[in-house]
Each structure stands twice: as C-alpha cells, then as structure tokens.
Image: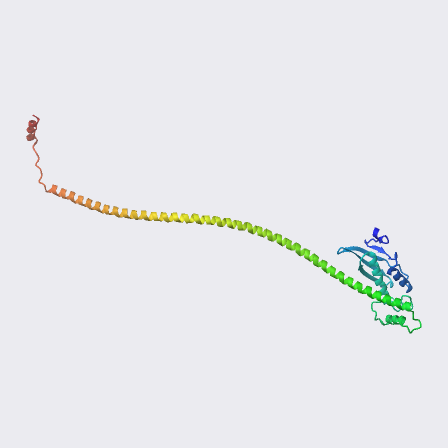
C-alpha cells in the first residue's frame, strides 16, 4: 500500500482509486461527464496489480452509471497501476464520446477523438473546425483538434502493438511452460530409460554368467561323453572277451560231455566184461584151515 498511497483496499482485495490525484484522463473523463449532465458518483477504478513475465502489470475495471439501468463497464490491462487507470479512463472517455456524440455538440468536448473517425457527424465537426473559409475558423482550435486526433491514433496503434506483444508474450510463456513440462517428461523418461538400461545390464551380466556356466557344463559334458565312449569301448572289449570265453567254455563243456560219455561207455564195457567172466568156486572152510595153520607155522 505504500506504493499506492492514493488508493484504498476494498473488501474484495482490489485497490480502489478515483485517479484524480494527478492531471490526466480521469479528470478529463469526470469533466466530460459533468458537461453532459452526469450527476452520479465519481468513477472509481478497481485495480489488481500483478507480475507477468517479470514485468509489472495491472488489471483495471470501472463501472460508470451514465444510464442507471445499463451502466457502462470496461476492463483494461496496463503497465503499472497509474498507467492502467489512465488507459481505462481514456477508453471510457472515447466510448462516451462515441455513444453521446449528439449530446456533445456545441460543448468543449465535441472534438474528442473517436475510434471510427469516418463517422459522418464527427468528421463534419472536424472539417468545420479546420475549414479556413469559415468565419469561426480558429487556427489554434484546428491544430489542437488535429493534434488530439493524431495523438489518439498514435495511442490506439501503440495499444494495438502492446496488445499484440502481450499476446505473443503469453504464447511464449505457454510455450515455455510446455517446454518445461516436456523437459520434465523427457527427464523422467530418461531416468526410466537409465533404470531400464541398468536392469538390462544386470540381466546381461546374469546371462553372461549363465553363458559361462553353460560353457563349463558343455565342457564337463564333453569330458563325460569322452569317458562314456572310453567306457563303451572297454565294455566292447570285455564283451568280446566274454564271448570268446563263453565259446571256449562251450568247447570245454562239449569235450567234457564227450569224455563223460566215453567214461560211461568204458564203465559199461567193464560191467559187460565182468558179467562174461565165469563164476569163482567157493572154498570149503575145513580144507582151508590146515593151510592156514601151515601158514602160521
């Protein structure tokens, strides 16, 4: 509030001022309103200063009940508070001059510039003041009317350029915000990508370790296969030896069977021969006794 000593703070948080603390359009507006018969309250400008793109800005609104049933309202955005109030008062003065053009005829404000400078009535007034052939021609009034017209046109063009620049600045700000959001999004995606790459690197290390382990297993398998082949070859050799032994055993079994058959035949021949021998006579015991005694003697 120290920067706006001529303002008061409203309940809505907006600053309020009549703008009459210094010469300018607010005073001219009030004077013009009085000249056309306005007896309402002094126009009060509601102001909201803020920062935009690092620059001081101010939104100003005003309501003027020239017609109590349909008050005139306006809103502008300017630089600092006082400049924005001047801009608002100038806009209201121009609007009043356009809407009450007939009412201002014959008044000192009759030649206030309007936006449509091809408007027939206003154009006729300006030409009448600047016509050197008329008896009421006054060079000072003509120069002041043209000066006011040129200044109005200059200010109007300046306001148009400023509005265009403000639009471009707003667009630049939106682009900057979008760029920041895109940068944040890309940062998040880059972080996620790095995490994914880290996970993939971990998986690659696991795969590499698995590959090395697989290589070791393949080497062990190759060695086992070689041992198995050697064992198979040894089994083959031993199987061949066993087959050879079995054949030898079969031969021996055949020879044994032949010998057993031969023995059996011989035994049978012995039995047959024994059966063919005459029987041996039995000796008398008594006759045999003396011989025994003789033998004993």
The percent coordinates of residue 185 (x first, y second) are: 65, 55
> Which residue sits at x=68%, y=57%?
179
Up the image or down, 111 lies above or below 180; here it is below
Return the residue found at the far top.
297
Up the image or down, 293 lies above or below 268; here it is above
The percent coordinates of residue 120 (x first, y second) are: 85, 72
Quadrant (top left, top right, bottom left, bottom right) of the C terminus = top left
Question: Which image quarter: residue 261?
Answer: top left
> Which residue sits at x=80%, y=65%?
157
Q: Nearer the viewer, residue 36 or 176?
A: 176
> Which residue sits at x=25%, y=47%?
248
The percent coordinates of residue 220 (x first, y second) are: 43, 47
The percent coordinates of residue 224 (x first, y second) are: 41, 47
Question: Which image quarter: residue 72?
Answer: bottom right
Q: How many marks?
A: 0
Q: Is residue 240 left or right of residue 63?
A: left
- Scheme of image coloration: rainbow
Q: Nearer the viewer, residue 41 or 235?
A: 235
Q: Nearer the viewer, residue 59 or 160?
A: 160
């Amino acid at each position: 509030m120290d920067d706006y000593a001529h303002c008061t703070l409203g309940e809505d948080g907006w600053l309020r001022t009549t703008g009459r603390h210094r010469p300018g359009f607010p005073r001219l507006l009030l004077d013009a309103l009085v000249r056309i018969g306005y007896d309402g309250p002094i126009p009060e400008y509601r102001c909201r200063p803020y920062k935009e793109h690092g620059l001081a800005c101010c939104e100003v609104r005003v309501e003027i009940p020239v017609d109590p049933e349909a008050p005139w309202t306006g809103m502008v955005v300017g630089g600092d508070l006082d400049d924005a109030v001047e801009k608002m008062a100038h806009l209201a003065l121009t609007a009043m001059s356009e809407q009450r053009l007939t009412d201002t005829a014959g008044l000192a404000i009759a030649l206030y510039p309007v936006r449509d400078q091809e408007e027939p009535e206003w154009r006729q007034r300006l030409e009448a003041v600047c016509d050197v052939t008329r008896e009421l021609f006054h060079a000072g009034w003509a120069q002041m009317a043209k000066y006011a017209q040129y200044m109005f046109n200059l200010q109007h063009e300046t306001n148009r350029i400023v509005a265009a620049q403000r639009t471009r600045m707003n667009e630049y700000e939106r682009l900057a915000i979008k760029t920041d959001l895109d940068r944040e999004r890309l940062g998040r995606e880059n972080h996620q990508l790095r995490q994914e790459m880290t996970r993939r690197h971990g998986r690659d290390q696991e795969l590499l370790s698995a590959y090395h382990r697989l290589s070791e297993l393949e080497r062990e398998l190759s060695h086992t296969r070689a041992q198995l082949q050697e064992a198979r070859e040894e089994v083959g050799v031993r199987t061949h030896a066993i087959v050879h032994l079995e054949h030898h055993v079969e031969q021996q079994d055949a020879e044994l069977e032949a010998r057993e058959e031969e023995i059996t035949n011989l035994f049978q021949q012995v039995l047959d021969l024994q059966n063919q021998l005459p029987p041996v006579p039995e000796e008398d015991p008594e006759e045999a006794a003396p011989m025994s005694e003789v033998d004993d003697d």
